[in-house]
Each structure stands twice: as C-alpha cells, then as structure tokens.
C-alpha cells in the first residue's frame, strides 16, 4: 500500500525547513542575513517539492515516497510518513507560498524588540510541522504534529501581531488545542478497537482504517465525532469559526497567509484522510450535519464578509464561506465534488493567499486595515488595483480563474445527490460577487481619499504600518512586489484554463477515498 | 410532433472541422493577444496601443469573413462543424471539453461582433483621445471581444459560461471606467450583481444537464434531451431564461442596463447595445433543441419578451437623458428578439435577424449620441440640446437613418426584421396571437413616439444650449466630430439602410441559419392576416411620430423638467418603480441582515463559544491572561470535551 521509492525526497521536504529554522534562529543577530538564509532554504524546499511532484506516480501506490521508523514500540507508534495525491498538492502549495511570503515581507518592520531571524525561523518551523501533518501516516504522530503545529503559530501571532495579538493568539490556541484533545480521545478509541481486534494495538493509519471501517456504526460515530470536532474547528466550519477573524486580523500579513491559506486546510484534509476512510458509515450517516454546517458557512461567511469594516477580518469570513464549499464537496460523495473539494483546497491557497498579500500591500501603504480609510486608490496605484481585482475575481470564482474549476466541480458534483444544499450554496455565488466588488469599489474607486494615505498616522492593529508611516507619497507596486505576485497571477489564470496537472494528481487518491466510503460508480 | 422531428434533425450532423474552420481559435487568439499586451504592457504601449487594439479585432473580422465565404458554398449538412481543442475539466464521467462550434449561428455572431466591434474600436480612437488611459480602454475592449467570441463559439454550455462571465467582467470594468464618479462604480457593481443572479440560473441549468445526461457539451445534450421528463425540460428552459434575462436586461432583471450608461459611449454602443446584451437571445436560440421540447418554456420566453418590450418602450418615453432613452430602447428591442425566439420554429431566425439589424442601427445611434455628447461638453440632458442638425450635419444624417431603421419605416432595415416578428406574433394560436401581436404592435407605436421625441429634442427646434452653460461652467460650442468618428457612423448608417432588405430578401438569412436553428416556419392561421400587418405597423409608427410632433415638436421644450406631472409619467420616470422594488425587497433587507449578523457573530456566537471555553477553563478572565494556566485548562477542557462528545453521541444515538 505504501511505496518507499523516492522516500529521500519526502525526508528532505521534512528536514530542509527544520534545519533552516535552526540555522536562521542562530543568525538572529543579523536581520539581513537571516532573511536571505530563510529565503534560500525555502527556495531549495520549493525545488525539492517540484521534484517530489514529478516523482509522484498518480496511478501508483496509495501512499508514496514513504518511510517509517519505530518511535514508541510499546504503543505501536511509528514515525511514518508518506504522501498521496491530496497530501502532495498541499505540500507543494506550502512549498510555493513560503518563499512568496518571505519575499512579500522582505521590507516589513518588525515590532521593536523582535528579530527577523526569530520571525523567519518560526515560519520555517511552521512549514516543517505542517508538511509533517500532511505527510504523517501514523495516527498518533498526526495527532502530535497537529498539536505541536500550534506552537510556532501561537508565537507568530502572539509576538509579532497587532494590538490585540495576545488575545487572538490564546483564543486560536485554545480552540485548536481543545479540538485536538477530543481527537486524541477518538484516536485512543481507535487504538483500543485495533487492540481488541488484532490482539495488539497500533496507530498505523492503514491498519486503523481497516479495523475501524469494519466496526459497527455506533462505534464509528464515536470515533467520527472526536476527529470531526478537531477538524471542524481547524477548517473552520460555522459555528466553530470565531477564532479565525481575530487571529487573521491580528497576525502579520505573512502569517495570515500561512494560517488561512495553509494551516486551515489541515481540517479539510483530515476529513478526507481520516474521517471518510476510517468511519465511512458514520460519515454517510452524519453527512447531513456537515452539509448543514458547510452550506450555513457559505451563506453566513459571505454575508459577514460583506458586513466587515476591516479588510483582514474580511479575509477570514471569505475563507469561512470557501470552507463551506469544501465541506459540501467532501460530504457529497461524488467524484466531481470530491475532486472539486481537493482542488478547492489548492486553489483557495493560491487565490486567497494572493488576496491576503495584496491586502497587505494596501495596508502597508495606508497604515490601516480599515476599509473606510481608503478610497480612489486605483488612481495612484493602478497596477496594485489590477492585481487586487484579479485576486478578488478569483475569490468570487470567475470562470477563467483557478477557483472556478474547483467551485464548479463541487457544485456540479454535489447537485445530483444533494440538490437542495447545492442550490443554497449556489446563491453564495451572488454574495461572493457582492462582497468582493463592494470591497474593491470602496478601496479603489471613487474620489481619492486621504484618511489613510495622505495622513498616515500608524493605523490601528497592523504590524506593517511603520514601514510607510514616514512616507507620504504612495507608490504603485514595486519590482519586488511584482515578482512576488507574478507566480500567483500565472497560476490563477493558468490553472483556470488548464487544471489538468492538478486534476491528474489528485484524481486517483480521491477515487481511493471514495471507494472506502462505498461510492465506486464514479459518481454522477 | 414537428418539434421533436426538427430537434432530431438538427443534432444529427456535426462534422469535425478542417481547413479554415479548423484554425478558428485564431479568431479568439487575436483579441486575447491584444488584451494581454495592452493590459500588461504598461505605459510602454501607450503610443500605439489603440492601433493594436483595432488591428486585432480587424484581423478577427477578416478571418470571420473568410470563414463565412468558405462556408457559403457548403451543403447545409456540412455547415455545422466542431473544433476540438483540449480537455478542460475532465473528472471521471464529467468531460468538459474546450472546443468550438463553427456553424451559421456562431459565424453570424462572429461577423456582428468583430464587424461592428471594429467600427466601434476605430470610433473610440477619436472618442477616447483625451483620456490618458486610452490604452487600457482598448485592452478592456479587446478582452471583451475575446470573451464574447468564446461565448458564441464555444461548443458546450461551460465554454459558453466562461464567455458569459467574461463579458460580464469586461462590462463591469468598462461601466466603471470613470472611476471618479461614485455612480459609475455603483452602476458597474449593480450590473455585475444582477447578471450574477441570472448566472445562477444558467449554472443550475448546467448542473441539471450533468445530473440528468452526464454531459454539458451541446452535441450530447441536444442528442439526449428528448429522454428527459417534461418537467425537467421545462425547468431547464426556465433556468436558461433566467440567465438570459440577466445578461439581456429582460424583465425582471432589466434595471442594470440603463445604469450601465455610466460607461463611455462606445462601451454603450458595443457592449450594451449591439453585442453583449443580445447574448441572452443567443442562448435561447442556441438551446433551441431544448426549447423545442417545452411549449411552456417557450411561452414564458414570449411573455417575458412581450412584457419587456412594453416596459422598455414606456419608460423610454419619459427620460430626458439621451443615452438612457437609447438604453431603454435597447431593453425594448431585445424584448422583441426574445419574443421572436420564444415562438420557436416560427421565430428563431427572426429573432436573430432583428438582433443583427439592431446591432447595426443601435450601434450607429449610440455612436451618434456619443458624437453629440462630444460636441456638447458631455451633456446628456436632451432638454439642453436643440437644433443640432445644423451644426452637426453628419451626425444628424447618420443618426436619422438609424432612427428610421429603428422605428421601422420601410425600406430601412428595422422594418423588415421587426415587422416579421410582429407578423409571427400574430400567428400564435388563439388569445396568444392577439395578446403578443397586440403588444408588439403597441411597442412599435411607442418606439416611434420616444425616438421621434428624441430626434426633435436633439436636432430640431430652438438651439436651447445657446443660453446655457454646462455643469463645469463652460459655454457650449457644439461641433461635428472628427473623421475617425464620423466614418464608422457612416458605415453603420449604410448598414441601417441595406441590411434588412439584404437579410430578409428571399429569406436569405433564415435559409442560411437553418442548419443551426431548423427551418423557419410560417403560421397558417394568423389572427390578423399577414398582408395587413405591415400596414398596421407602419400606420401605428406614423401615428407615434405624429403624436410626438404634436406633444414635443410644436412648441418650445422647457429646459427644466416639468413638475408636477401625471402619475403615468411619474412612474415611467422612476423606471416603473423597478429600482425602488429592488431596493425595498433585496438591497435594504440584505444590508440589515449583514449588519445584524455581524453583531450576532461578535456578541452572540463568539460570546457563546468563548463563554463555554471560559467556563471550562475555570474563570472568565482566563482568555485574556496569557502564557500561564494551560495545565489546568488542559485538564478542564479535556473533561469538557469528553462531556461534549458524550452528549453528542447520545444525541445521535437516541435522537
């Protein structure tokens, strides 16, 4: 089931950012060198990720590039890793976004007593742990990484964020940590089921999948709920979402990208990797619950996004709406919807990552993340306006952008089995146009307003504000910013017209996931 | 049934394209290249950007002409060709292909889009010459042309959808062109949103096709359509119609189109008169095998068309803004086209014919209006015009020809196409013939009235502008436009004269379109004899002209709007309360809902979840105290979490 060829690639993917984190931490004394070193490591990581993608055989074993060593033999816990198509695309997206985030944050001023080395070291550590979560094939290892992953993020928000950073960081930590604990209870439950069944307990993913999926529905539901709560907090699904707006608003822009565009995907990834294969009967039984939460998220997130005054909180609610679509796709159990959900995870990372970055660029110029502080910006920064619009259009899933492919697949695949939920979610399309265009109109159209731009006075709640506080002239995109945004722009349009590279990689893994739920007809 | 028979006949033959048609993707590639170069090229391309913009569209036009002439000699069965390009969205059973369908219907649209498009591009060189962002304008224009070509050339409903939303984007960008005006930004957003309402209909129709037939490609959908239940087919027709109403400004989604006049006038001419707004008519015509299967669906199309043509022409009588009158005229004329395609085999080709003639004369009228505005410091209030015929002879001449075409005076083009629709409407069975024919006839009279009013207020009578100043305090010095603007107007005016006669003569167009739309039929029993209809139409139009002269032409036009006015005029001035209704039913409640939810989310949901977390953690201050106390909350929350799971478990088990 697990192929071990090319395991070196995965080992390298895990170790490079880890080593990088240590090295960069040691270079704390020199901000510039630390920054350059971090970028160097992240670029090497990207190169290895590309190699790993090329080495991956979509038609091959369920898990590839795998390896395993004993960790706690008494409990049958292994340090074992491996990727399927779904994990692979997520790993690739992280590898892509980290150097972009470093480039975007190149000129940011950090809070007074903080060093660039500390910041970028934490980012690299975050990258290593997140890749570990996606690649773990031992359930206990997954749990541990799921929790440990919170630590760098906690410090990234709590030490480098805005005015209410500590509140936001603790709230983020508590929510996720609590969810994780409940998951641990379920994982232990699964372990004991395996131990009853096989005479010997194990946390091996493939074994647990076999054992638990054969268990009666009543037991599966128990396991399901534990995992589900952890993932639903992470994703986040309404009504477990309220930590995200605070965290997204207080975190520095680059951290918001990592948090919203990548970390949250662990939740939906968990649905696919753990819930569906391990507890197929419970997943089908409780699908209506998830669908209600998902579709509620689509509409609720969209309406709240429209009502926000702060651009960074806006991002959080937009994402909540998007996660609703992903949940709908996963729990509709058709090939199209499922592939749609997985590509949605990738495309959301790209397009929302881009939207967060351009919002960061606006905030960096105006020193405020309040929408009301802006107006008419398109006149002085036409290129920024153009890129912002492209990112916005990708967020509203305009055909021709990458997000359209995934949203279309989710909806067309979900319509057959779940017409009512799908119709409701389709209304979200209108609301998406509303919140994106309204934001764009208020920030970029109309007469040029000076509240934020010409009267810069260190706006509220942003770590990037000081960078421009002194400078009154507003400049359009710089060469560095263009370079950072260009790959995202290319991917947004490129994957919109030619999504086959992603579809091909995730297709067989999705099919395997669906087979475990008992859907084998390819869906219609 | 004739209907079934026809549908089966149409889907029989689709051959794989070779030669010129095989490379038809070049049609789209030219404007795409133009748009990319102009939008990414930056200031470097300012000097020659407008020329490149025109050249790409002219190249597509030339290619389209070559394609047209290469296919005229083919037998009708060879005229429907498919160009496979690549698999766009392949997931298991869903195989969305990116490919083109080259057939008489799509070629007709290609010629309209690139032909009229080229003229309007050229006109824009002059019209936009003072705008420092002219290069970007041409970039958006090229983007529009490319999207519109994808819309009409795509070989499946998803490629159509791509173009559909693409033109919506271009329209959004161009309506909001004058970014200084908040009203422009609002109008742009409104257009996009109302279109999205319609798009939901189109999207749902596509979902149904896949759920029921497992495909979204034209060939396969049309081949399988008769296996579906009548209810499903009717649902499809209504959902597609919703999409068409959004894009084409049909009732009840018409309110965005007049607001869209905030964009520069060439935009109004190309996008909001000649091409994009007719996409809804294209959709119904393209989906004719579906509509053939549902009489109810067709009936609703006819009702929407009839209603819209009346609504548009009534409101058109009340406005003083020259572009808004023309906009409502467009709404109303597309109503005619909708009505026609709703008549099924009796009208598909007629709807397309009116679409083509209208594309010419309405584009010409808009360019004329643009020329007037250009000479009048961008003033749009006709009450400030008057007597302009003498100072703008070319504009007046070409505008007058467009006017005669629009109100349907023989032998101008609008007469042929509109009269044919009115005849066909009277051909509907029983009460329908009377109602739809009557509505179409009444609309013709109203059209004559409001257009004559426009002509009189603009070009005749006292030169009211002599005593007035424009809003920025300047005197008016109306003058004729530059040749680069006049020449396109002249070409379009020639089209207004000749096109109808050319297309209608010997049913040339209907014959040519038959491989796409089926043979055009003529009703055997019309409630009003065919021979009588032209006389009635022309008679009523002349009556409209006469009334307009009596009301407007005989006396001086007051420079300010007369107030108070009777209820009908008041209602018409306020768009028959369409906007007020939208505002009251959707916009305002929506805003309140969003605001209320923000409050609830901050206080309610967050508070509730925090409250639980805090209670589990032992004290409400815990959340704000950092760094310490994790161990206790750890234990407490583990307990709380277990209780939660247990409760949920029991709830599921014993619910």
Image (tube, coloured by chain):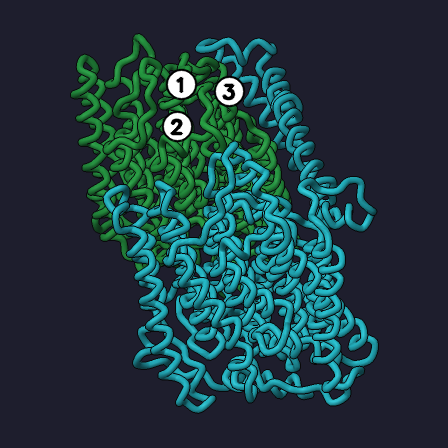
Chain colours: A green, B cyan
Picture quadrant where residue B240 is located: bottom right
Q: Which mark is residue A171?
A: 3
Question: Which quadrant is home to the C terminus of chain B?
Answer: top right
User: Label 3: chain?
Assistant: A
The image shows residue B474, relative to residue A165, as above or below, that is below
Question: Which quadrant is home to the N terminus of chain B?
Answer: bottom right
Q: Nearer the viewer, residue B460 or B140?
A: B460
Task: Please tell me which residue is depicted at 36% across the width and 78% down the height of the picture.
Answer: B67
Badge 2 is on which residue?
A: A362
Percent position of residue A521, x then y = 51, 66
**Callout 3: helix, strand or loop?**
helix
Q: What's the CA distance linking mark 1 and mark 3? A: 35 Å
Percent position of residue A298, x then y = 58, 42
**Callout 1: helix, strand or loop?**
loop
Picture quadrant where residue B292 is located: bottom right
**Callout 2: helix, strand or loop?**
helix
Q: Are marks 1 and 3 in contact (CB under 8 Å)?
A: no
């Amino acid at each position: 089931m697990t192929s071990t060829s090319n395991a070196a690639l995965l080992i390298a993917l895990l170790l490079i950012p880890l080593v990088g984190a240590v090295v960069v931490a040691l270079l704390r004394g020199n901000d510039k060198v630390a920054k350059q070193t971090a970028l160097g490591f992240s670029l090497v990581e990207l190169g290895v990720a590309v190699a790993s993608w090329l080495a991956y055989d979509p038609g091959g074993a369920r898990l590839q590039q795998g390896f395993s060593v004993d960790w706690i033999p008494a409990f049958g816990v292994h340090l074992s890793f491996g990727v399927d198509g779904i994990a692979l695309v997520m790993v690739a997206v992280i590898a892509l976004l980290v150097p972009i985030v470093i480039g975007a944050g190149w000129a940011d001023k950090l809070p007074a007593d903080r060093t660039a080395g500390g910041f970028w070291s934490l980012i690299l550590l975050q990258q290593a742990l997140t890749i570990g979560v996606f690649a773990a094939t031992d359930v206990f290892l997954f749990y541990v990484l799921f929790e440990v992953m919170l630590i760098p993020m906690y410090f990234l928000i709590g030490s480098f964020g805005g005015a209410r950073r500590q509140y936001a960081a603790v709230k983020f930590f508590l929510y996720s940590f609590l969810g994780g604990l409940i998951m641990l209870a379920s994982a232990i439950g699964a372990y004991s089921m395996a131990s009853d069944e096989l005479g010997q307990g194990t946390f091996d993913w493939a074994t647990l999948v076999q054992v638990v999926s054969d268990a009666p529905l009543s037991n599966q539901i128990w396991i399901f709920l534990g995992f589900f709560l952890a993932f639903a907090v992470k994703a986040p699904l309404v009504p477990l979402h309220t930590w995200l707006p605070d965290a997204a608003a207080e975190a520095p822009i680059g951290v918001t990208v990592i948090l919203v565009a990548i970390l949250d995907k662990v939740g939906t990834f968990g649905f696919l990797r753990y819930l569906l294969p391990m507890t197929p009967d419970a997943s089908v039984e409780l699908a209506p619950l998830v669908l209600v939460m998902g579709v509620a998220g689509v509409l609720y997130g969209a309406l709240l996004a429209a009502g926000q005054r702060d651009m960074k909180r806006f991002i959080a609610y937009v994402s909540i709406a998007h996660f609703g679509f992903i949940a709908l796709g996963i729990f509709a159990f058709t090939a199209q919807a499922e592939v749609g959900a997985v590509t949605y995870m990738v495309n959301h990372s790209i397009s929302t990552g881009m939207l967060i970055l351009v919002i960061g660029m606006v905030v960096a110029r105006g020193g405020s993340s309040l929408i009301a502080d802006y107006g008419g910006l398109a006149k002085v920064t036409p290129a920024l306006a153009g890129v912002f619009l492209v990112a916005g259009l990708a967020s509203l899933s305009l055909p021709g952008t990458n997000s359209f492919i995934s949203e279309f697949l989710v909806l067309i695949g979900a319509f057959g089995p779940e017409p009512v939920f799908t119709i409701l979610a389709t209304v979200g399309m209108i609301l998406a146009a509303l919140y994106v265009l309204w934001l764009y109109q208020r920030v970029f159209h109309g007469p040029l307003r000076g509240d934020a731009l010409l009267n810069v006075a260190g706006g509220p709640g942003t770590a990037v504000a000081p960078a421009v506080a002194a400078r009154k002239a507003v400049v359009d995109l710089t060469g560095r910013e263009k370079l950072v945004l260009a790959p995202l722009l290319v991917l947004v349009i490129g994957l919109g017209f030619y999504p086959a590279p992603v579809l091909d990689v995730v297709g067989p893994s999705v099919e395997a996931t669906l087979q475990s739920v008992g859907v084998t007809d390819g869906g219609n | 049934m004739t209907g079934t028979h026809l549908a089966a006949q149409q889907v029989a033959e689709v051959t794989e394209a070779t030669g010129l048609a095989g490379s038809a993707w070049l049609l789209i590639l030219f404007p795409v290249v133009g748009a990319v170069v102009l939008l990414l090229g930056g200031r470097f391309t300012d000097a020659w950007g407008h020329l490149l913009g025109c050249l790409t569209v002219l190249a597509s036009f030339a290619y389209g002409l070559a394609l047209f002439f290469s296919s005229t000699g083919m037998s009708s069965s060879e005229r429907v060709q498919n160009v496979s390009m690549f698999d766009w969205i392949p997931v298991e059973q869903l195989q969305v292909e990116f490919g083109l369908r080259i057939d008489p219907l799509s070629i007709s649209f290609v010629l309209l889009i690139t032909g009229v498009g080229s003229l309007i591009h050229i006109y824009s060189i002059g019209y936009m010459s003072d705008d420092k962002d002219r290069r970007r304008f041409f970039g958006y224009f090229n983007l529009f042309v490319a999207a519109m070509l994808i819309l009409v050339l795509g070989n499946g409903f998803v490629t159509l959808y791509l173009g559909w939303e693409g033109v919506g984007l271009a329209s959004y960008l161009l309506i909001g062109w004058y970014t200084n005006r908040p009203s422009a930004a609002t109008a742009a957003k409104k257009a996009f949103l109302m279109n999205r309402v319609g798009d939901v209909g189109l999207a749902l129709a596509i979902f149904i096709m896949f759920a029921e037939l497992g495909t979204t490609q034209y060939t396969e959908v049309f081949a399988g359509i008769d296996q579906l239940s009548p209810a499903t087919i009717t649902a499809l027709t209504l959902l597609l119609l919703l999409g068409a109403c959004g894009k084409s400004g049909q009732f009840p989604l018409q309110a965005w189109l007049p607001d869209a006049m905030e964009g520069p006038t060439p935009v109004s001419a190309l996008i909001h008169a000649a091409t994009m707004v007719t996409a809804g008519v294209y959709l119904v015509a393209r989906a004719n095998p579906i509509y053939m299967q549902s009489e109810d669906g067709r009936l609703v199309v006819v009702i929407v068309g009839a209603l819209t043509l009346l609504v548009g022409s009534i409101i058109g009588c009340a406005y003083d803004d020259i572009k808004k009158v023309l906009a409502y005229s467009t709404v109303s004329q597309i109503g005619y086209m909708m009505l026609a395609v709703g008549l099924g085999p009796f009208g598909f080709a007629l709807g397309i014919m009116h679409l083509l003639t209208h594309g010419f004369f309405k584009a010409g009228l808009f360019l004329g209006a643009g020329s007037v505005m250009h000479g009048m410091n961008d003033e749009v209030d006709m009450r400030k015009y008057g007597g302009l015929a003498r100072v703008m002879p070319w504009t007046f001449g070409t505008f007058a020809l467009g006017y005669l075409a629009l109100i349907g005076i023989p032998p101008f083009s609008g007469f042929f196409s509109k009269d044919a629709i009115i005849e066909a409407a009277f051909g509907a069975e029983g009460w329908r013939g009377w109602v739809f024919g009557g509505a179409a006839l009444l609309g013709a009279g109203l059209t004559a009235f409001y257009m004559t009013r426009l002509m009189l207020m603009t070009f005749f009578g006292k030169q009211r502008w002599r005593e007035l100043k424009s809003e920025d305090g300047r005197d008016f010095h109306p003058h004729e436009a530059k040749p680069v603007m006049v020449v396109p107007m002249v070409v379009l005016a020639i089209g207004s004269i000749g096109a109808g006669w050319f297309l209608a003569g010997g049913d040339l167009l209907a014959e040519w379109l038959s491989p796409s739309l089926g043979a055009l039929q003529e009703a055997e029993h019309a409630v009003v004899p065919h021979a009588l209809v032209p006389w009635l139409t022309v008679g009523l139009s002349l009556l409209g002209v006469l009334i307009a002269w009596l009301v407007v032409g005989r006396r001086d036009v007051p420079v300010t709007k007369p107030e108070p006015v009777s209820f009908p005029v008041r209602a018409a001035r306020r768009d028959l309360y369409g906007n007020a209704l939208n505002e009251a039913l959707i916009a305002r409640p929506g805003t309140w809902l969003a605001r209320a939810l923000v409050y609830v989310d901050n206080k309610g949901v967050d508070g509730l979840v925090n409250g639980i977390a805090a209670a589990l953690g032992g004290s409400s201050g815990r959340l704000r105290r950092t760094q310490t106390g994790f161990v206790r909350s750890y234990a407490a929350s583990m307990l709380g979490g277990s209780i939660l799971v247990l409760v949920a478990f029991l709830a599921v088990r014993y619910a």
